[in-house]
Amino acid sequence: MSTISRRSFIKTGIAAGSVMLASPKDARPAEVKTLPPDRRGVLVDTTVCIGCRRCEWACKNAHSLPAGDITDYDDESVFANKRRPDDKALTIVNRYEKIGDERFPTNVKIQCMHCEQPACLSACIVGAFKKDDTGAVVWDTDKCIGCRYCMVACPFQIPAFEYEKALDPKIMKCDFCIDRQKNGELPACVEICPAEALTFGKRSELITLAHRKIELFPERYYNKVYGEAEVGGTSWLYLASREFMELGFLKLGTNPAPGVSESIQHGIFAYFVPPIAFYALLGGVMWLNKNRNRGEE
Ligand code: SF4
Ligand code: SF4
Ligand code: SF4
């Protein structure tokens, strides 16, 4: 078992470097709270990622998802298509072929960005999501009623739903290995990365480190830290050798996405149905679905 004090953790000084039916009390969106200054993040340096996909294996392994043999991940044919995280793979790596005088292709790891002001949290009508002090955006599967508002609201299209599961399908996404973090361990993907492409540490120090790298190696890095400002900032931050939009990143503004999802949510409540009726309807549909599924099973 490794500890957070391992090499990938930024130390001080380096910075120079369900409810089936939610009760009326529970049935409300979670509040966005003040974030602690030492909340964590990960800096993904796509210029050193070798596309080994060990992070994919480690993530599945850490979350009891079918992971297969680690050598299966040497199969580079998967790079023929651009993939997205789903309920069976909370993180994936895509490859972008080299252009111009680049010597290597660029590999981009994708997972939940753990937004500073998460749209998923804001959109969730039963307050199942929370932004933890670690920086992780996590959710309570017992509170979740399966409305999938979070999937619609997420600007990065991250939350996935276990459509294939007959019994108790759940929302799935990267949880920033919050249990490992609370045990003093690194996120599984960070720990296994052989190229040190993933640096775990305080978000504020990671931003300093990222700008320092750009300053020191302007020929290597495109002059931008993706996630520093997008949708109000994200815990996962990226460096790249070229314009991010060429690498599958979305062009997003700096305004937090919650404003949009809250407007939708409040619009529903204001003009469509009262909240209690809405929760009752959703809860009823979920109850019927779950019992039908159990009957079929
Ligand atoms: S990336 Fe999407 S799922 Fe992850 S915290 Fe942000 S809004 Fe939520
Ligand atoms: S932080 Fe944990 S859950 Fe998220 S991608 Fe890495 S291994 Fe998977
Ligand atoms: S383990 Fe590290 S080097 Fe390998 S694909 Fe994942 S981020 Fe890239």
Image (spheres, rainbow, N blue to C red):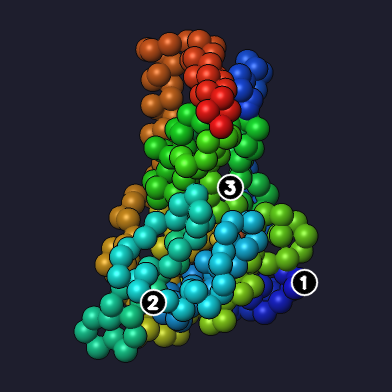
Secondary structure category for the residue under label 3:
strand
Asked if the residue at label 2 sits under 8 Å from ligand 3, the reply is no
Q: Which of these two is toward me, 243 or 247?
A: 247
Say how many tags the image has. Answer: 3
Quick one: quadrant of the C terminus? top right
Vertical side of 90 occupied by 286: above or below:
above
Q: Quadrant of residue 177?
A: bottom right
Identify the disc placed on residue 1. 1
**How many angstroms separate mark 2 from mark 3 (CA)?**
31 Å
Type of the residue with mark 2: Glu
Q: Earlier in the sequence, mark 1 or mark 3?
A: 1
Q: Quadrant of residue 262?
A: top left
Within 10 Å of disc 3 (Cα), the crowding (few <14, some 14-19, many 20+) is many
Vertical side of 1 occupied by 135: above or below:
above
Type of the residue with mark 1: Met
**How many angstroms separate mark 1 from mark 3 (CA)?**
24 Å
Identify the disc placed on residue 137. 3
Quick one: quadrant of the N terminus? bottom right
Asked if the residue at label 1 sits under 8 Å from ligand 2, the reply is no
Identify the disc placed on residue 76. 2
